[in-house]
Amino acid sequence: MLDSAALRTRLADVRDRLTRAAGRAGRDPAGIRLVAISKTFDADYVRAAADCGQIDFGENKVQEALQKMDQTADLPICWHLVGHLQSNKAKKAGLRFDVVHSIDSADLVSRLDEAAGGARRSLQLLVQVDLAGEATKFGARAEGLPSIFEGARSCRSARVVGLMLLPPTVDDAEQARPHFRALRAIRDRLLARGVDAAMLGELSMGMSHDFEVAVEEGATIVRVGTAIFGPRTWV
């Protein structure tokens, strides 16, 4: 059951922790987007967070997200798709989401660009990088990134704006730090190869258990769910 007061307190705590992490890194917290991951929580939770000034919300599944979008259409929300996107759902995603974090192929970029272009809307894309090679996670391997960025240069409505990472699950947030540093290093290598800096401005990394470390390592977008909405009863 929704406890709006508790949600407000948790959201304020996350914002405070983000601000302090940015301070430790000598960064301006205003340059870091907090995406509230609302997957499995109904539209009432989204409304409660929006009442606290939260703008960015993230979902894992297209169909679940579309229902919440319809139910909160009166709110000024920016919707992020952070879960794996199958090619056959690219059109639906391109028509409704504002940011897609899970790009893993040039073909998916093309499909989303076509969908967004047909609707005369803009769409931001982040390329998900697979650093761990885990069978349960998706993403492009580092050696496949140049071809994705090359293909994205011809986009008209969709724009690749950075990289995204899902590191291996760890008990200690410090264990995630090397993965965050590795993503930043990949970004730097792509820049050195001549990839347009406008396509590499964002680093989406860090979740409820490790977002402070991610901020210290350069994250510009953090994806926080349970620390804002509370424990999930199903996933």
Image (cartoon, helix red, strand yellow):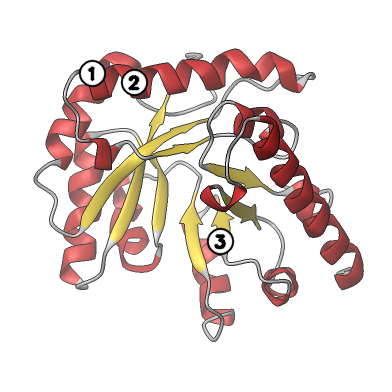
Mark 3 = which residue? 56
Circles 2, 1 touching at the beta carbon (< 8 Å): yes
Q: Where is residue 130 in the image (x, y as percent from the top left)?
A: 44, 21
Determine which quarter of the picture holds residue 118.
bottom left
Examine the rendering and report whether any part of residue 162 can be seen.
yes
Q: In this view, does 193 lie to the left or right of 54?
A: left
Which of the image's four quarters has the N terminus? bottom right
Q: Which of marks 2 and 3 is in front?
A: 2
SS for dot 2: helix
Neighbour class for label 1 at 10 Å: few (<14), some, many (≥20)?
Answer: few
Marks 2 and 3, how far apart at CA: 27 Å
**Considering only order in the chain, which callout, 1 or 3, is on the residue closer to the N terminus?**
3
Q: Position of residue 92 (x, y in %)?
A: 34, 63
Residue at the farthest left position: 154
SS for dot 1: helix
Marks 3 and 1, how far apart at CA: 31 Å
Q: Position of residue 170 (x, y in %)?
A: 72, 19
Q: Which mark is residue 188?
A: 2
SS for dot 3: strand
Q: Position of residue 31 (x, y in %)?
A: 52, 49
Q: In this view, does 91 lie to the left or right of 212?
A: left
Determine which quarter of the picture holds residue 36.
bottom right
In this rendered view, identify the residue nearer to me: 99 or 216. 216
Q: Looking at numbered disc 3 in the image, what kind of residue is underneath it?
A: Asp
Q: Looking at numbered disc 2 in the image, what kind of residue is underneath it?
A: Asp
Q: Which mark is residue 112?
A: none
Q: Residue 192 carries which label?
A: 1
Q: Residue at x 53, y 64 (%)?
A: 65
Q: Which residue is drawn at 51% across and 41% down?
A: 220
**Considering only order in the chain, which callout, 3 or 2, is on the residue closer to the N terminus?**
3
